[in-house]
Image (cartoon, rainbow, N blue to C red):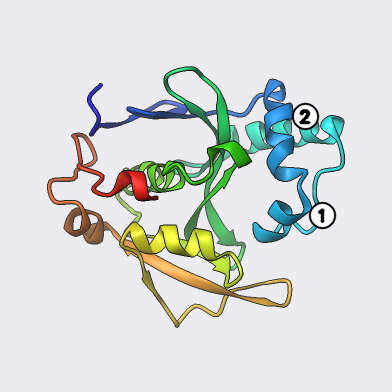
Amino acid sequence: MDDLHVTIEPGRIVTSTLVLRSWSADDAPGAFEIYGDPRSAQAIGMGQPVRDLVEMRDLLRRWALESSQSPLPQGLWAVEAADDGQLLGGATLLPFGPRDPQLVMGWHLRPKARGRGVAGQIGHALAHQAFLASEVDEVFVAAPARNAGSIAVARRLGMTAVDDLAWTRGDVRLEVLRMGRADLHKIRPGISLDSSYDPEGLNDW
């Protein structure tokens, strides 16, 4: 695979540097670095951080089951490095809520994976996954204003703010950004769902 390709496989999304695949209970130690950290849990709206590895393994099993039962293109994925298989974080593509079926993408990174452009690569991979479904015309990022990192990544992906979705998590109003199907092609000339794209500025994400 060259540096520009994204491949959608059954149960996996593969880029030149990342593999998004199903969660496993064996991922618990690395996942706990994210979901067991109070600051990370708050930033991604978990409410309470995961308490220990036992709870983390149980949660990963539930996520794997939920993902396997979710209709395409939805899912929850572990994100690993393509070259050495190290767990880098997690990714989600799910409806915002029961009354809001719009698909929202998210990324959650281990501390050592931050600041390396991984979030932007995940975002592009998830956009490919979302728009693989013919009925999906837009995908969103929703984050509290204090989660400046995710908002910045969304903007670098070319997403634009919307003000007609008053989404909240708890009592916190969320910043909502949108990417349309056509926007993906405009932002990265030559991008398509079954060929390569040039992730300009990749190392800055």
Q: Tell me: residue 7, above or below residue 137.
A: above
Q: Amino acid at mark 2?
A: Arg
> Which is nearer the N-term, disc 2 or disc 1?
1
Say left or right for 98 vs 52: left
Q: Quadrant of residue 39?
A: bottom right
Q: Tell me: residue 144, above or below residue 163.
A: above
Q: Secondary structure at mark 1?
A: loop
Q: CB atoms at circles 2 and 1 under 8 Å apart?
A: no
> Residue 155: where, in percent of width, then height?
37, 64
> Residue 53: where, in percent of width, then height?
83, 31
Label disc, if present, on residue 57 of the rendered structure = 2
Q: Tell me: residue 49, above or below residue 164.
A: above
Q: Tell me: residue 113, above or below residue 98.
A: above
* Residue pointed to by mark 1: 48
Q: Amino acid at mark 1?
A: Gln
Can you see residue 110? no
Q: Secondary structure at mark 2?
A: helix
Question: Which residue is pictured at 38% across the width and 29% down the height?
Answer: 17
Label 2 – label 1 distance at C-alpha = 16 Å
**Mark 1 surroundings: few (<14), some (14-19) or many (≥20) residues within 10 A:** some
Quarter of the N terminus within the rendering: top left
Question: Which residue is pictured at 40% across the width and 48% down the height?
Answer: 120
Say left or right for 161 vs 71: left
